[in-house]
Image (tube, rainbow, N blue to C red):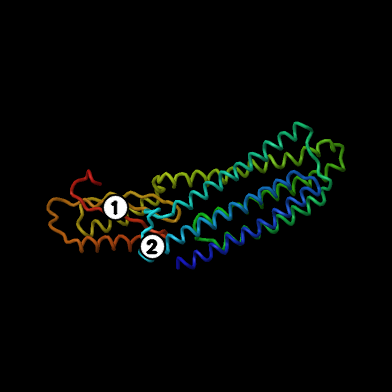
Amino acid sequence: MTGNKDSIEHSLLRFSVWMGVLFTVLGLGWGMAIQSGAILFDGIYSGFSIILSMLSIIALRMMSIADDHMAKADDDDRFPFGRMAFEPLVVSFKAIVIIGVCLYGIVTSVIHLMHGGTQSTSSLLGMLYAVISITVCLFSWLYLKIRGRGLPALVQAESEQWLIDTVFSGVVLVGFVISYALTFTNYQQLIPYIDPGVVILGSIYFIRVPLARFISSVRELLMMATPSDMQERLQERIDGIAASHGFEEVVVRSAKVGRELTVDVSFLVHEGFGAVEVDQLDVIRAEVKDNLADLGYNIWMNILFTRDKYWA
């Protein structure tokens, strides 16, 4: 099942790379042809998306190697605790790059505004590009979102990039429609400010999504606690196991890193519990593992049995 998911992820990420290549060529070529900063910005964004998508593929391959090692019970000396941190690392790097591209768009557009703005040579050709872009970006977003439903953050981040591009293409279309409409009014002096204004508005909107993704990824890299709803689910399930085996108390800690859920469980044994065989403890460990199997993560567990709460 894991191998099948990896295959789907590889396929979706390759799809995103090739669509990125298409839009980089289209955006840069079309933008230079009609001298549109908004379309050029779209092409630059797509160009960075190609590099970021390729990083996602590399990260997925690294994690697949880790899965193969685990399947063969072969320890990886360089990554003794697994390679799942590659996923939030790549996602956070992607977010930083996208934020950087947006800031670049804002700064350059402000400079253009201060120097009287810029004006494309054809609003109609700009509208045509925007319509094509909206159509293809919307298709790419829906394709990744539907086929990638239930898949981890790499595909979700990829899908979000195409959603951002779809919205930006819509903003570009509105900008060109306004520019075209102004040619029939007495406000033609405003037209040079529309193109850089669109880039600024689009960039400000775009920053929100990668910023939220960056914060989430950093939380994972720092191994901060899982969200409260996940903590409650874990505690409830493991409390049930503790009660069924007569344990006095159980302390549960958890952290999510990429597609891996690290769970630290400490069962507190009361004084009169009696002697327990190691095989019996392993049965309880297996019960915990089976109980968490449906959460949809690779589970990394530490399970401790102690009478002294200090060790918990």
User: Picture coordinates of residue 205 (x, y %)?
Assistant: 63, 43
**Residue behind mark 2:** 70
Q: Secondary structure at mark 1?
A: strand
Please report the residue visible at 67 percent of the width from the left and 40 percent of the height from the top.
Answer: 105
Q: Please tell me in which quadrant of the rendered image residue 156 appears.
A: bottom right
User: Picture coordinates of residue 15 (x, y %)?
Assistant: 61, 62
Residue 155 visible to the viewer = no
The one nearer the camera, 66 or 136, is 66
Q: Secondary structure at mark 2?
A: helix
User: Picture coordinates of residue 293 (x, y %)?
Assistant: 37, 62
**Residue behind mark 1:** 265
Q: Is residue 189 above or below residue 65?
A: above
Please report the residue visible at 87 percent of the width from the left and 43 percent of the height from the top.
Answer: 184
The mark that comes first in sequence, 1 or 2, is: 2
Please report the residue visible at 79 percent of the width from the left and 39 percent of the height from the top.
Answer: 118
Q: Amino acid at mark 2?
A: Met
Q: Please tell me in which quadrant of the rendered image residue 197 appears.
A: top right
